[in-house]
Amino acid sequence: MCITKLLQGDCLELMKKIPDNSIDLIATDPPYRVTSRGNTGNSGGMLKKDIFSKGKVFTYNDIDCIKYAPEFYRILKDETHLYVMTNHKNLAHMINTFLNSKFHFIKSLIWNKGNKIMGHYYMSQFEYILFFRKGKGKKINNCGTSDILSIPNKKTKNLKGENLHDTEKPVELMKILIENSSKENEIILDPFMGIGSTGVACVNTNRNFIGMELDENYFNIAKDRIEKAKTQRNDDIERNKNI
Ligand SMILES: C[S@@+](CC[C@H](N)C(=O)[O-])C[C@H]1O[C@@H](n2cnc3c(N)ncnc32)[C@H](O)[C@@H]1O
């Protein structure tokens, strides 16, 4: 049975309470500035002009990776993996910052989202998943996994048909990363969990999860989704016992 710990607040403060060398994997999708044309690389469409003129998709997206990269390094155990999602605009800065924080850059994976976003310079259909390691190299668990992950970009909607989070990542995508870079009962951290896709993937794969989110609304949705995933998993386990 997995343990989940969900914390609402600024992850820069919350991570200070996590001991050194205690986390088995970080898989996260941090906030970053969108392009001048409003392409987030994951919005599934162009954003409203008033939003993208400020470079914002959601309320809290002003955080430079320089602030959290050294903290990621401190709390990860030795010989562990780190996945960080980003767009082309932030790619060079992200890679350089994590290298400066002593991580080794293994490679970039591609999330092929299926849907395409209009733009002047080719339509956008993918997002980068930067794959780093701390310390000595460790193979992934399924070496037969392609570095292009084609998972449809399907968003969870509310009753009005609106996205619960505009940059939600599919649970299936997070599951691939988690299963390849951790074992059951290990501790996975997502400090920018949004509405909790990484947490749901951890519950479904029997990993312990620590999730952090600053926005109260997203935090409450994440809590609810993760609780539902736990109930579903317990029901499935009970049902299988009775077969
Ligand atoms: C790109 S979204 C992550 C979406 C997530 N992958 C999902 O599937 O729902 C980044 C999230 O980080 C949150 N955030 C921004 N600054 C934060 C901070 N300092 N501490 C914790 N969360 C923060 C934002 O509110 C946003 O929900």
Image (cartoon, grey):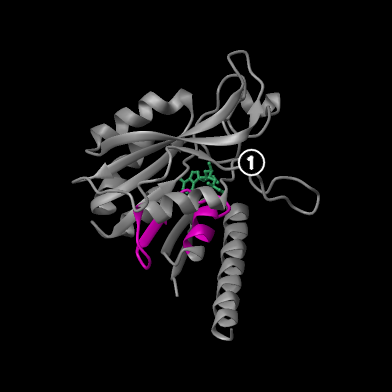
Question: What residue do we see at 54% from left, 60% from top?
Answer: 200
Q: Is residue 81 above or below residue 46?
A: below
Asked whether 223 falls inside the magenta stretch, the response is: no
Q: Is residue 32 above or below residue 240?
A: above
Describe residue 63's horizontal placement relative to residue 66 as left or right.
Answer: right
Determine whether the residue tagged by mark 1 lies in a helix, strand or loop: loop
> Residue 61, percent across and down?
52, 37
Q: Which contiguous range is marked in magenta?
A: 181-202
Q: Is residue 201 above or below residue 38?
A: below
Asked whether 187 falls inside the magenta stretch, the response is: yes
Q: Is residue 64 visible?
A: no
Q: Is residue 122 above or below residue 169?
A: above
Quarter location, residue 168 = top right
Describe residue 32's horizontal placement relative to residue 225 as left or right.
Answer: left
> Residue 62, percent across and down?
49, 35
Quarter location, residue 112 = top right
Disc 1 within 8 angstroms of ligand 1 (CB): no
Q: Is residue 187 visible?
A: yes
Describe residue 50's horizontal placement relative to residue 235 as left or right.
Answer: right
Residue sticking out furthest to the right: 160
Badge 1 amino acid: Asp
Describe residue 88's horizontal placement relative to residue 133 as left or right.
Answer: right
Mark 1, other Cα within 10 Å: few <14 / some 14–19 / many ≥20 = some
Q: Which residue is mark 1?
A: 166
> Residue 89, percent across and down?
47, 23
For the C terminus, the quadrant is bottom right
